[in-house]
Amino acid sequence: MAELKRGRALLGAGLLLALGGSVFAMPQFRLTAIRQLHYDKLDPLWQYSGKVMGCTFCHVNKGGGAPWNVFGQALQKGFQANPKSNFGQVLFTVLSANGDSDGDGYPDAIEVFANTLPGDPASHPDTPLAELEQAFAAAGGVAMYASKKGGK
Ligand SMILES: [Ca+2]
């Protein structure tokens, strides 16, 4: 992505998102997010199973594309607020803000840590928040989700 102009990169990424899984098995944003949030550690065959971090992490529909859920919308707003940032940086910025996109009482970063959906209030951890926050901090906190050097 580095060799592409930012605007073109964003447009291309948008097209990838718009096309969803119909043409590309796994869009670049999803690949980036899975690695950045360490979801690749959950399943050694994640690239083939297609089950790790499903489209509903950011999209309303299981097949991806528009519309985006509230967490996906938070990422879109992050892009609008920081048009010079790449996807990985926006993802980290949104998680670092400690917001609770779906309003279920669990901040987005905590839901990432607990492997629940930050854009769906029906999906949330069962563990009490204070307990999760303690485990999250012990594991390294939101810094674990920093964009890789150089970004992707
Ligand atoms: Ca939440």
Image (cartoon, rainbow, N blue to C red):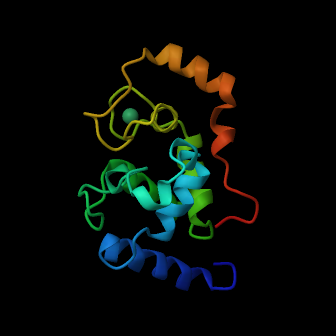
Query: Total number of numbered labels?
Result: 0
In screen coordinates, is 122 left or right of 55? left
On screen, 106 above or below 151?
above
Locate residue 86, reporting x and y percent. 60, 67
In screen coordinates, is 68 left or right of 27? left
- Confirm whether residue 4 shows in the render: yes
Image point (60%, 59%), residue name: 88
Q: Nearer the viewer, residue 63 or 120?
A: 63
Image point (31%, 52%), residue name: 56
Image point (59%, 20%), residue name: 135
The quarter of the image that holds ligand 1 is top left
In which quadrant is the N terminus drawn?
Answer: bottom right
On screen, 71 above or below 135?
below
In screen coordinates, is 116 left or right of 22? right
Locate residue 16, reporting x and y percent. 41, 76
Image point (25%, 55%), residue name: 60
On screen, 124 above or below 120?
above
On screen, 120 above or below 131?
below
Among the 4 quarters of the image, the one containing residue 22: bottom left
